[in-house]
Amino acid sequence: MVRIVISFIAAFAAAALSGRVIIPVLHRMKAGQSIKDIGPTWHMAKQGTPTMGGLIFIFGIAVSILLLGWRDFADGRFGGTFVFLFALVFGAIGYVDDYFKVKKHENTGLTASQKFLLQLAAAILFLVLMRGHRYLSNVLYIPFFNISVLIPWPVYMVFAAFVIVGAVNAVNITDGIDGLATGVTMPVALFFLAVSAYWSHFELGVFSAALFGGLCAFLLYNFYPAKVFMGDTGSLFLGGAVCGLAFALDIPLILLPVGIIYVAETMSDIIQVGYFKLSHGKRIFRMAPLHHHLELGGWSEIKLFCVFTGITAVMCLVSFWGIMDRYPV
């Protein structure tokens, strides 16, 4: 437990300090966010706010893993390292996307098909690696009901790969207003920290603590009014981290309740687009995804942050109750 506390402190300190360096560098690079003109009109005031700020908490987490993860690696416990590297690959995909956006000075980087193929390849590689090191099983655990279902490996691998890609992009969609993806992911990180400690997977606990610490520090710069945005660099990294932890702990279905906000944001987008096409131009929401709908209904960014983070925190508590009987302690 001491290592977990130190992991949090190390990640928080490294991220908080690195922000003072990285944000000015992003300003000098003119790495400003291009705001879509189809969004809320008042968001245009955010034009030019530096993006790629996810580098701040990625750096903090990396420092923590290097300081505290080497013992697990030396002892043959690779779970935390694999999850970090997996998240880092997704962060790299996001960085490339952000780089092209900044270079072209518009809000389009990699094409949708390019991102999908890169993410799918990363997901498959991670799953093969985790299966090879026996972190993954084809027994699908169903939370709350405390039952498990055996699934053929080919079916499970296809299921898992598409769950990962879908969940990672759901986190990306949630990153639409100041601090939202940061705040929503903080209780999710605490949830995985609690589960890791409860089940004695301390190498995953070290990573979860570093994730929480890095996000706490990043919130100093990302809370409304944001001094920096995480960009796809940060949101795809977070998606990879959350999915990686869920699969490393062999509880992928828990992503539904703990990621209830991610799910709601994504479903609002899918419903809006689908209904728009079917109805030839009609809309269900004022604007998608959900946070924009509520913004146009009068919700402030701070209220959205507090409500969405609070809902996630409650669902994480409920989810912990839903899985705690899997391995009675």
Image (spheres, rainbow, N blue to C red):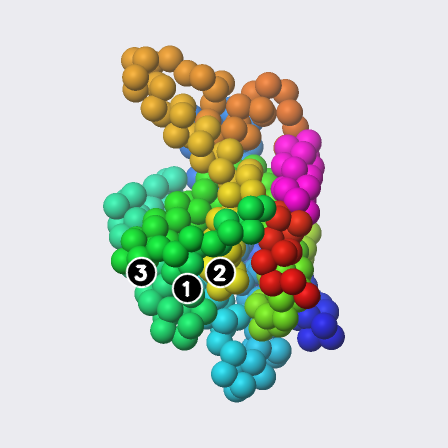
In the rendered image, residue 72, in percent from the top left (x then y), is placed at: 56, 80
In the rendered image, residue 164, in percent from the top left (x then y), is placed at: 40, 52
Residue underneath mark 3: 153
Residue range of the region highlighted in magenta in the rendering: 302-318
**192 or 81: nearer the eye?**
192
State the residue at coordinates (29%, 53%).
Answer: 155
Q: Position of 15 compared to 32: left or right? A: right
In the rendered image, residue 142, in percent from the top left (x then y), is placed at: 50, 49
Given contact means CB atoms under 8 Å apart, are the residues at marks 1 and 2 in contact? yes
Q: Position of 3 compared to 53: left or right? A: right
Spot the residue most to the bottom: 74
Which mark is on residue 250?
A: 2
Mark 3 surroundings within 10 Å by alpha-carbon count, few (fewer than 14), some (14 through 19), many (20 or more): few
Question: What's the distance in space between the residues labelled 2 and 3, CA to CA?
Answer: 14 Å
Q: Let me know if residue 118 appears in the view.
A: no
**84 or 217: nearer the eye?**
84
Quadrant location of the C terminus in the rendered image: bottom right
Mark 2 surroundings within 10 Å by alpha-carbon count, few (fewer than 14), some (14 through 19), many (20 or more): some
Q: How many marks?
A: 3
Q: Is residue 154 above or below residue 167?
A: below
Question: What's the distance in space between the residues labelled 1 and 2, CA to CA?
Answer: 7 Å
State the residue at coordinates (63%, 60%).
Answer: 195
Residue underneath mark 1: 137
* Amino acid type for the residue under numbered disc 1: Ser
Q: Position of 63 compared to 152: left or right? A: right
- Give whichever of discs 1 and 2 has the lower sequence position: 1
- Give whichever of discs 2 and 3 has the lower sequence position: 3
* Amino acid type for the residue under numbered disc 2: Asp
Q: Circle 1 — which element?
A: loop
Given contact means CB atoms under 8 Å apart, are the residues at marks 2 and 3 in contact? no
